[in-house]
Amino acid sequence: MTDRRLHPTNGRVAARELEGTVSADRFVDGVTMCVGASVADLCAAPDGPRDRQVLFGERVRVLETVGAHAFVQADKDGYVGYLDHNALMDPFDATHVVCVPSTHLLERPKVQAPNIRALPFLSRIRIVSGAEGYFETHDGLFVPRGHVRPANRPFEDPTTVAQLFFGAPYLWGGNTVWGLDCSGLVQAALIACGHTCPGDSDMQMTLGRPAESPFKRGDLLFWTGHVAICVDAQVLIHANAFTMSVAYEEIQPAIDRIAEQGDGPVKAHRRL
């Protein structure tokens, strides 16, 4: 059975590569566009529930536009869904990514300048020049130099990346410091380090290889519908609905608590 989260068809339209395998009124190649909003919800249906989020500068393949919504497939993980068509813009080649939890694009290269747009971690931008401690983007705005890094220079440690989000609020389907869930945290941490990573914990459970105790930094622990990252042999970090935030927790007490609340034992322990 196909997974609708990754299957680029809605019955009316389907991606060209699915021709002969699915039924649809039209088969299309799609059009590449970039996300032009700070963050856009990727939803299961127009005006439906949020599945995941896509970030400024990320590329999507637009398969259909219906009213105010575009049916798209995200480049970063193949996720399919609907987003506000007004959140899209013409594609550009990113040179840098935001490397801090969030930043602002400013009207001028001055600390007092009006902020034009907030950007979350891993937003993609194109730098064209530098001035006075700032980089200028291709659309004429300015970002602090220390808030971005070259897109071709990934982080090295996923756990360090996850720790950037400590205290961020929990948000189902979220992918930013303004709100994210367990799999959003893991996806941000791994993608920042150059790893391919799907959007949901059930799909992430295939990452790496099976591991056994003792737990090591960077290990992934999975429950039904939940994932956490080990900080060391005793402590994990996860976005969780218990604290409604990204929080540290001792591993064994977390295992015991999750079992006691009815969500069962650890289903998988994976090591990248």
Image: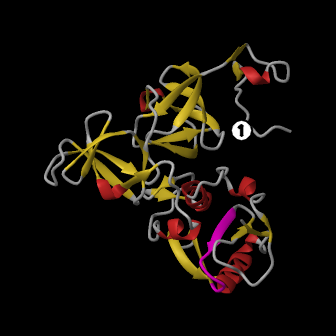
- Work out which quarter of the rendered image holds the N terminus and state it: top right
Seen at 58% across and 54% down, the residue is 191
157 magenta-colored? no
Residue 27 x, y percent position in the rendering: 72, 16
- Left or right of 55? Residue 1 is right
Q: Is residue 241 visible?
A: no
Between 227 and 258, the one lying in front of the other is: 227
**Image quarter for residue 15?**
top right
- Work out which quarter of the rendered image holds the C terminus and state it: bottom right
Residue 167 x, y percent position in the rendering: 44, 70
Picture colour scheme: secondary structure
Seen at 69% across and 57% down, the residue is 201
Counting the numbered discs, the total is 1
The magenta region covers: 226-234
Compared with 217, 78 (above or below) is: above
Residue 43 x, y percent position in the rendering: 58, 39
Q: Label 1 crowding class (10 Å Cα cut-off): few <14, some 14-19, many 20+?
A: some
Residue that label 1 marks: 6
